[in-house]
Image (spheres, grey):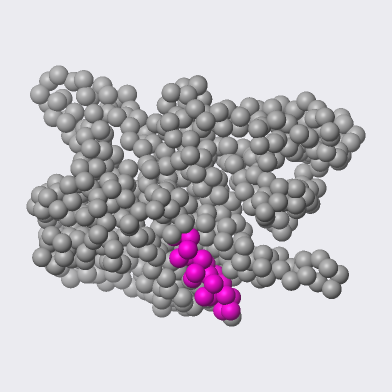
């Protein structure tokens, strides 16, 4: 059962915007339409969820279809309403347009992708209708233009999946991606528990008292002064890379840049000061008092996540640096009294995904224990775990020089299927072909400039063409693994959400009047509060810790079955229960 949601041309003259809800049955046929004020939407959504759950039975809920969850769901969450499932048309569109599974469909051939930062909000539309709220009609009326466009797009997407070469995989991917859209909005609404007082203490310890105006913090200014003295540059601005390089050169220190990895190779008292300055300057700039004022409120850090913000399917964030919380401030991410943070990360996810994709039985045997690298080391690297890890990461990322390159031969000999799989992806990329993740997310096609480079004729142009081809090969080599790992993580996250929702539902105790307690369920049960590639964090009350740990582990096994079926490769998750995120690793 589908419920399509779009702005409506109907509404009271000169008053609030209205919305249309179009109900479709499983075949896509229109059943009924409801029009209501935007302000009445949360109540209507709650009622329809309950009504259709009873109609569908077995705890099944309808699937909401909207252009983008970000345009609708935050308002519902603010009103205390959560939905079970959705189809995010914009996110699904980009997958279907690019996927090799749908390459021959009319949809893929005629539809343009959307930019990753496309964030249109539902457009309020006023009209002269007097009716503010229409009950479900037995004979649906004509759709408004917004609804007609949404329905046409949704129908075309479903048809594209049916006509694809892998409809089951694509269906799973679109469901997981859309669930991610709900989770991203829910995590922003809930927020990561954050102790501003602990954050202030961290800043005081590293930077000194909070400065006024645009002044540097006390400890930062002290290091700047020491650096000026050491370099004999009294007017040096250490925040200027150009000034720094010139001052270093005048002091006889040869360096091309001020990047930390390059400076760390140089032995000089000024370099030690400069590295210390850069470290705490980064803290001040990225997560200092300005960040705290902007991003933390009410004891919660609420960043904006971008689902599928990276072409491989990994998430990104827009502002707040949610996916780059430095270790220096993780102690401020702290559970509420009587609650704990449960941090789970998938152990060595990408290597295990590679073993599953390649159906490499020997590597699968090495992955039987929790430490895959140790298993590989025991099989072919004389027990040297570091060498085994370097070799495998080199195979996935295309390292052909240094330690990884030297070890590649041994890895290929021990695991021909796994190495052959990524080598085939690399060769495809070098030829300008497109590669695809397990569930159907495909990498971008090469640019016109890249293709033109490959057609060059002179010796110099051919060298550039070969370099460009190798670079693309390294990208596609890793894309098939990282993209499939992102597929697995999306399914894991969706399973965690579904199972936590079921756990929370069990906590709803009927009141004396026979109705469920009106207290928002997400405050009584565990909360998904953070997700980073292969890491999930849940904020849970003490009495539910064992149940949440079980959910995280069972969800991992469920995600593996969804992607690969019953395979002899485990995808274990490392789980820690802590008060502070700083104690998780």
In x, y percent, where is residue 269?
Answer: 18, 71
In x, y percent, where is residue 313?
Answer: 42, 45
* Residue 191 visible in the snapshot: no
Residue for point 37% across, 72% down? 585
- Please provide the residue range marked out in magenta: 538-556
With respect to residue 249, does 19 lie above or below? Answer: above
In magenta stretch: residue 542: yes
With respect to residue 189, does 48 lie above or below? Answer: above
Q: Is 387 positioned to the left or the right of 84 in the image?
A: left
In x, y percent, where is residue 486?
Answer: 41, 49
Q: Is 539 positioned to the left or the right of 378 in the image?
A: right
With respect to residue 158, does 106 lie above or below? Answer: above
Q: In the rendered image, which quarter is residue 68 located in?
A: top right
Residue for point 64% across, 39% down? 66
Q: Nearer the viewer, residue 313 or 2?
A: 2
In magenta stretch: residue 515: no
Figure quadrant of the N terminus: top right
In x, y percent, where is residue 157?
Answer: 55, 31
Q: Is 402 positioned to the left or the right of 281 in the image?
A: left
């Amino acid at each position: 059962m589908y419920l399509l949601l779009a702005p409506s041309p109907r509404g009271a003259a000169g008053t609030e915007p209205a919305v249309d809800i179009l109900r479709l049955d499983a075949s896509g046929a229109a059943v009924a339409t409801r029009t209501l004020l935007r302000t009445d939407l949360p109540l209507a959504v709650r009622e329809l969820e309950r009504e259709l759950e009873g109609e569908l039975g077995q705890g099944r809920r309808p699937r909401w279809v909207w252009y983008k969850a970000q345009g609708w769901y935050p308002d519902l969450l603010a009103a205390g309403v959560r939905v079970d499932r959705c189809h995010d048309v914009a996110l699904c569109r980009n997958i279907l347009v690019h996927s090799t599974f749908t390459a021959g469909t009319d949809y893929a051939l005629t539809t343009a992708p959307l930019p990753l930062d496309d964030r249109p909000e539902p457009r309020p539309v006023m009209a002269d209708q007097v009716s503010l709220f229409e009950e479900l009609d037995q004979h649906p009326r004509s759709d408004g233009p917004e609804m007609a466009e949404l329905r046409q797009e949704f129908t075309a997407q479903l048809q594209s999946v049916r006509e694809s070469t892998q409809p089951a995989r694509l269906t799973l991917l679109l469901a997981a991606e859309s669930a991610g859209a709900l989770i991203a909005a829910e995590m922003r609404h809930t927020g990561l528990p954050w102790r501003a007082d602990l954050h202030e203490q961290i800043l005081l310890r590293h930077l000194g008292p909070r400065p006024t105006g645009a002044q540097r913090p006390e400890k930062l200014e002290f290091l700047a002064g020491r650096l000026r003295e050491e370099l004999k540059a009294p007017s040096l601005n250490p925040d200027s890379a150009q000034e720094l390089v010139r001052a270093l050169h005048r002091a006889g220190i040869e360096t091309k840049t001020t990047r930390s990895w390059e400076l760390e190779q140089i032995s000089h008292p000024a370099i030690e000061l400069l590295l210390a300055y850069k470290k705490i300057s980064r803290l001040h700039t990225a997560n200092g008092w300005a960040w705290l004022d902007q991003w933390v409120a009410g004891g919660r850090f609420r960043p904006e996540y971008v689902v599928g913000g990276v072409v491989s399917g990994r998430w990104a964030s827009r502002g707040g640096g949610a996916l780059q919380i430095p270790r220096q401030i993780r102690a401020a991410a702290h559970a509420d009294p009587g609650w704990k943070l449960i941090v789970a990360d998938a152990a060595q996810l990408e290597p295990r995904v590679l073993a599953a994709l390649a159906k490499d039985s020997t590597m699968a045997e090495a992955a039987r224990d929790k430490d895959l690298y140790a298993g590989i080391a025991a099989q072919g690297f004389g027990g040297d775990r570091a060498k085994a890890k370097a070799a495998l990461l080199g195979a996935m990322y295309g390292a052909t020089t240094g330690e990884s390159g030297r070890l590649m031969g041994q890895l290929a000999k021990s695991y021909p299927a796994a190495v052959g799989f990524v080598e085939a992806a690399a060769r495809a990329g070098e030829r300008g072909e497109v590669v695809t993740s397990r569930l159907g997310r495909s990498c971008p096609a090469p640019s016109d400039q890249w293709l033109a480079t490959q057609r060059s004729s002179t010796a110099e142009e051919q060298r550039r063409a070969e370099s460009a081809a190798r670079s693309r090969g390294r990208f596609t080599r890793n894309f098939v693994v990282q993209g499939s790992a992102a597929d697995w993580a999306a399914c894991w996250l969706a399973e965690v959400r579904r199972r936590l929702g079921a756990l929370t539902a069990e906590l709803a105790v009927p009141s004396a009047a026979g109705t469920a307690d009106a207290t928002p369920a997400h405050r009584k049960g565990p909360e998904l509060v953070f997700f980073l590639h292969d890491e999930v964090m849940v904020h849970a009350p003490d009495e539910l810790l064992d149940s949440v740990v079980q959910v995280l582990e069972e969800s991992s096994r469920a995600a593996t079955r969804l992607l690969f079926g019953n395979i002899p490769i485990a995808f274990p998750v490392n789980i820690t229960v802590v008060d502070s995120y700083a104690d998780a690793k």
